Image (cartoon, rainbow, N blue to C red):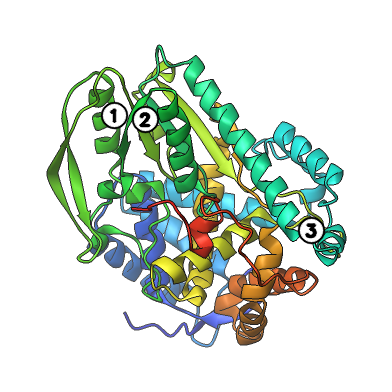
Amino acid sequence: METHIKQVIKRTGAIVPFNQERIANAIYRAAVAVGGRDKSTAQSLSEQVVELLNQKFPEGTTPHIEDVQDVVEKVLIENGHAKVAKEYIIYREEAANRRDAEGKYASKINENVPWQKIWRNLDWAVSHNLHTVEHLNERIAKGEFPHIVHESEALYESDVEVAANLIIERLDSLRMVMISGPSSSGKTTTTIKLEQKLIKKGFKFKALNVDHYFFDLEFHPKDEFGDYDFETPQALDLELINEHLVRMSNGEEVMIPFYDFKTGTRKLNATPMKLAKDELLLIDSLHGLYPAFSKDISVEVKFKLYLEPLLQMKGKDGRYIRWTDLRLIRRMLRDSVFRAYNPQQTLEHWHYVRGSELRNIIPNSNTADFVISSGMPYEVPIYANRMLKLFDGWKEKYKGDPLKADALERSERVYNVLKTVTPVTDESSVPGDSVLREFIGGSTHQYH
């Protein structure tokens, strides 16, 4: 639709081009969150928003993003889309709260952080001289990198062992085990390792591939760059997942759909699946802890695991290395090795990943029965070797581009850590079955 509004002012003060498609996408995203999937209605509503903005703001003026969002809310409510308006308002408030919390984080208690596990990991890091980048570098200089690998792997394996024993204690009532966590936390490898440990003790499993429950690609929200958002739980057919889990837990056969990633389409009733009385269902999913995923399943029949690389290591600036940055690098490496996906695309997409996990994954972490830490102190020097030059290039590339402010911030932060770490080129001491091999390649596990 034609408009005389050419630019908008972001909350940072940056001035960016006005884009109606961003409004349509924001409306559609809110609609998807409450079960709607009508893109034409979202487009029509965005045209009404532009029309009102044209009336409200004379030619030559530049509205603030808050002004635009106020008009979006008004249009949604006046057109009878109260549920969508509520979702849009909630999302807007949550985003504002996250921004406000950035500067106050150090003094704010986050109830979603597994503090007991963090203290245990910090104590371990201090006792192994791995709690700061300086100490890590000192140990590498002494030729101790293979020892660091061994110590790190032993810590992770002990977590997996504890999880296996907790599951065994509840086998009388359990029907399914959900391995959940944010992107690149190591769910696939952990699922395999857990299965191996339990098979040795005589237990049987079936794995459910949740990817087959994706809606057709045309129904996914996307941005003005054509980037699809697969990260929200609403990208999955949650109603069908929940129905199938209920039926399988009752011993019934269900017909699993098949999702073709090449065509972006789903075929229903593709593959029969049934749990025998002596079998457990293993579910590896980003959103395994999301309430609607298994809302009708009794807590007695499901065991919920949560993964996060809870690395406790301070950089030279005195700040702890962020877990989200470790996972970003992991996903970059995995996407480039296994999915022919450019690492730069991963970086530019990460704001979707992070936004969804802050909203839909991490807040549910405190409902888990056990937390596994997949963070390895030795992965940082490997990334310093593999990724430093890329992040150096990205931090220069995104300077002065207000539309890529998130990518710039992440690039600068990661670069400033990696440039202080002694790079390690010899990765031969990393075991073939390590969780890190899921991302850097060379795993002895077969990933499907």
Q: Is 116 left or right of 181, judged from the image as shown?
A: right
Residue 412 is left or right of residue 349, and the answer is right
Dividing the picture into quadrants, the one containing residue 420 is: bottom right
Asked whether disc 3 touches disc 1, contact meaning CB atoms under 8 Å apart, the reply is no
The kind of residue tagged 1 is Leu
Mark 3: secondary structure = loop
- For discs 2 and 3, the disc positioned in front in the rendered view: 3
Q: What number is the disc on residue 245?
A: 1
Q: Which residue: 28% across, 44% down? A: 237
Let me know if residue 309 appears in the view.
Answer: yes
Within 10 Å of disc 3 (Cα), the crowding (few <14, some 14-19, many 20+) is few
Q: Residues within 10 Å of mark 1 (few under 14, many from 20)?
A: many
The structure residue drawn at horizontal position 58% and vertical position 55%, both measured from the top left corner, is: 95
Q: Could you tell which of marks 2 and 3 lies nearer the N-terminus? A: 3
Q: Secondary structure at mark 2?
A: helix
Closest to the observer, 376 or 305? 376
| Residue 11 on image: x %, y % | 64, 68
Horizontal and vertical percent position of residue 309: 63, 48
At a point 55% along the width and 61% down the height, the residue shown is: 330
Pointer 1 with pointer 2, Cβ within 8 A:
yes
Is 106 in front, or is 25?
Answer: 106
- Is residue 62 visible in the rendered image? The answer is no
Q: Which residue is mark 3?
A: 144
Which label's residue is closer to the chain start, 3 or 1? 3
Disc ID at residue 294: 2
Which residue type carries mark 3? Glu
Crowdedness of circle 2 by 10 Å Cα count: few (<14), some, many (20+)? many
